[in-house]
Amino acid sequence: MTGLVAQLGLAHPIIQAPMAGVSTPAMAAAVNAAGGLGSIAVGATDADGARAMIADLKARTDRPFNVNVFVHAPAVADPAHEAAWCAGLAPLFHEFGAEPPTALREIYRSFAEDDAMLAALVEARPAVVSFHFGVPGADRIAALKRAGCLLLASATSLAEADAARAAGIDAVVAQGFEAGGHRGMFDPDAPDEQLGTLALTRLLARRAGVPVIAAGGIMDGAGIRAALALGAVAAQLGTAFVGCPESAADAAYRAALAEGRPTVMTRAISGRPARGLANRFTAWGESCGLTAPAYPIAYDAGKALNAAAKTRGEAGFGAQWAGQGARLARFLPAGELVRTLAGELG
């Protein structure tokens, strides 16, 4: 058994991805009970929300778990750009009898500047804390390490993995271009190498100098085995868990996943590149000719549009994040899915 997996006391090298808006304490606890590493995501909530989620999870499991935060560069407001974006969305809002927002806001804070969230994590002392969109400052890393937390960070390139290692991160999550949800790029406006999971995993396993966890398009035991053969110490699966009954995905999201739709990369929903199931929102984003405002300011408009559409029975404007392996999804309880994956891994 590899060092990281043994250190966390896992029976299987399987990590359930910390999907904001989808993963739940119930899901993480079920994954833990089956021998994997369960995760929750608190990047889209505040410190009080994080405390409540962590307390819920601790009441369900005594095993190690992962708490994920977002470390994006804080958004810079651009009222003119945001007004133009809302004007472009206006016909869609009008279709559902609603008006677009008159102003947009940054709907959640980056961990890079959220002292209250840092205090909540230091107080809770989860076994693992993971970062997406970058790594925080040295003071935050040192505080979490003093609290006994093992630190992970997403990396989409060797340069990002090198930066994570230099910052003191214990292991990197190699997020391939196939992965569902938001690209973990430190700078979303920089050129994207678009490395696939297998190429990135092998590159980081040979060059990053820290343990590597493979993520992106992995849906079954064969995919996990391939990642391990390329030097990963574990595999992180997200889309595979969306259809679990413990997931917070709504009925429309589950139906779109079961339908077997293709996935596309879009900025239209949130303002950052993210892969999701093709729907009306992603189609509009491809054809609108507009550039979305900064993340997560653009997400304020996207969430408002989705809410308006849902009141009229239209589910095609949701953030239905999924990776390229989505058509391999199985709708099993989370614990049963982990046991099935472990059986396939052999």
Image (tube, rainbow, N blue to C red):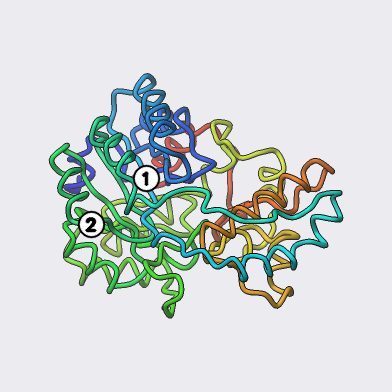
* Percent of width and height locating residue 267: 58, 66
Q: Which residue is rendered at x = 23% and y = 57% of the image?
A: 137
Is 47 or 202 nearer to us in this picture? 47
Q: Amino acid at mark 1?
A: Asn
Residue 68 on image: x %, y %: 37, 45
Label 2: which secondary element: loop
Against 284, is 31 above or below? above
Q: Amino acid at mark 2?
A: Gly
Q: Which residue is mark 1?
A: 68
* Front position in the image: 134 or 31: 134
Circle 1 crowding by C-alpha within 10 Å: few under 14, some 14–19, many from 20: many
**For the point 74% across and 75% down, which residue is it?**
287
Total marks in image: 2
Q: Mark number for residue 36?
A: none
Residue where numbered disc 2 is placed? 137
User: Extreme left residue here?
Assistant: 146
* Left or right: residue 268 compared with residue 202: right
Residue at image coords 69%, 58% = 261
Residue at mark 1 to residue at mark 2: CA–CA distance: 16 Å
For residue 299, side relative to residue 176 (left or right) = right
Location of residue 160 by image quarter: bottom left
Q: Residues within 10 Å of mark 2 (few under 14, many from 20)?
A: few
Residue 257 pos. (x, y %): 66, 49
